[in-house]
Image: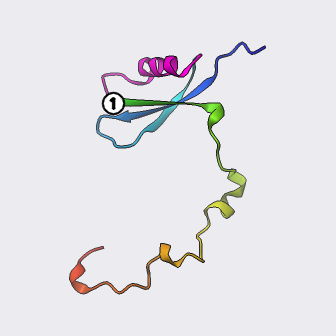
Amino acid sequence: MQNEWPLWEIFIRGQHGLSHRHVGSLHAPDAETAVRNARDVYTRRSEGVSIWVVEAAQITASDPDAKEAMFEPAEDKVYRHPTFYDIPDDAGHM
């Protein structure tokens, strides 16, 4: 028998930002309650314009021990590093 509510990860978008930022976690019985509680706990002085809540059990993450294989540069994808293009002088800073 489980006596604890699910854990929710909270993301807030600030008034002057374009992306949501992880601000913390809280326990709540459902998503709607998690949003209301996140508003009360993580937004003060009207700094938030959007709240996302994600049940922590639904998050899948990469394995930190496999970071070399996951994030090493892809040498076979030369288009990701456009070092072979000629840039005209009148193009300015790029």
In this figure, which colouring scheme has been used for the structure?
Answer: rainbow
Where are the magenta residues, as a range? 29-47
Task: Tell which residue pokes out farthest to the left in this image.
Answer: 90
Q: Quadrant of residue 69?
A: bottom right
In the image, 89: left or right of 36? left
Identify the residue at horizontal 31%, vertical 84% (top origin).
Answer: 87
- Could you tell me the amino acid type at mark 1? Val
Q: Specify whether residue 16 is painted magenta.
A: no
The kind of secondary structure the magenta stretch mainly shows is helix
- Name the residue that disc number 1 marks: 49
Q: How many marks?
A: 1
Q: Specify whether residue 31 is painted magenta.
A: yes
Q: Is 78 placed above or below 41 here?
A: below
Residue sitting nearer the eye, 89 or 55: 55
In the image, 47: left or right of 72? left
Q: Quadrant of residue 91?
A: bottom left
